[in-house]
Image (cartoon, rainbow, N blue to C red):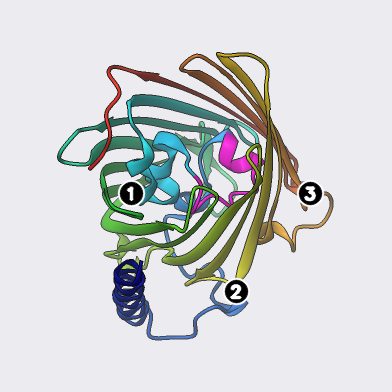
Amino acid sequence: MTANIKQFKLYIICFINLSLFLLLSSTSDAFLSKENIGTTSAQFLKLGIGAKSAGLGNAVSSVCNGSESIYWNPSNLAYLNQKEFSFSHTMWFEDINYEWLAFAMPTDKYGVFAVAVQYVSYGNLDKIDNVGVNNGSFSPIDMAVYLSYANRYKQFNFGGNLKYIYSKIENSASAVAIDLGTNYDFNNKTSIAAVISNFGTDMKFNNEAEPLPFLFKLGGSHFITNDWLVALDLNFPKDNELYINLGTEYMIVAGDNTDFSIRAGYDGRNKDIPGLNWINLGFGIRYLDYVVDYAFVPYGEIGMTHRLSFSIKFGEKTEVK
């Protein structure tokens, strides 16, 4: 027990030192300030993915979340014991389509490998010059491709992403970034996590280069009962002030092969939007290895959004060692 505590302390110290190094490397100006809103590029990287996560208010850095963990905390891929395919679609504003596609494959000896694509299409937009003349149209897109790995050592999960980021308005720009994550299980009820996201190169449109939306996150989750989960995330972004995510989920077992989950959450990133924005709601249904999740996410006066996710597990079960 004493040895495990020492290993845990050493692990946390190493991760904190790495986090501080990346924090200092990623910014030389004010940090955690509203004054920095709009100073980073590739804003689509902050949209979040998955209906389960949205229903929990995106407080999922320490939550077992299947292949969607690629986005939230790649270390949690180590919980997977079967191959998993997941797809998420978000009904966004206007003609914007937001998609997520992921595949994860655990192995007996070498950890979990995964790949994912995050894609946003903004539809056709009119190209209007400075005197109001229509010069045709253009179709902006944003995309990120993730290559992921995770493994487990006793109670520690650790993992990372290497990702290629691409944006096109009329001109295009690209960047390369990494995500790093860890999770520690105190027992089968309580976990804590730390995540670094979007540490990478600048994106350059024309002559101006802008940094990526770097984020450092700390999270924790606890099962109050075997069926009732609560979770909290603290977010330290490069381009905004500190905000929190809160979420809860209650699972109802409906049979040997079926369960139903109801969720509610709060996303502090949206707190300044006028109107209804303080609560996300969602539910999920699992039958055998098939899972369907839905979430309702309001953005106040901007409008309402709906997220729908589907995942399936298949193949022989394995245990990451």
**Contact? badges 1 and 2 (CB < 8 Å):** no
Does the residue at mark 3 contact the one at mark 2 (Cβ under 8 Å)? no
Q: Give the structural element (helix, strand or loop) at label 3.
A: helix
How many labels, in total? Answer: 3
Q: Earlier in the sequence, mark 3 or mark 2?
A: 2
Residue 255 lies, in percent from the top left, at 63, 14
Location of residue 130 by image quarter = bottom right
What stretch of residues is rendered in magenta? 52-63
Pointer 2 residue: 241
Asked if 163 appears above or below 39 in the picture, the reply is: above
How far apart, in angstroms, are the residues tagged by discs 3 and 2? 20 Å
* Residue in view at x 33 percent, y 31 percent: 81
Q: Is residue 58 magenta?
A: yes
Q: Position of residue 40 (x, y in %)?
A: 45, 66
Residue placed furthest toward the bottom: 29
**Which is nearer the eye, 183 or 319?**
319
Report the side of 207 relative to 250 (left or right). Answer: left
Of marks 1 and 2, which one's residue comes earlier in the chain? 1
> Which element is circle 2 on?
loop
For the residue marked with disc 1, what is the amino acid? Asn
**Residue type for callout 2:** Glu
Residue ID at (45%, 65%) = 215
Query: As drawn, which residue projects farthest toward the left?
Result: 109
Q: Is residue 18 visible?
A: yes
The residue that disc 1 covers is 171
Q: Which residue is mark 3?
A: 300
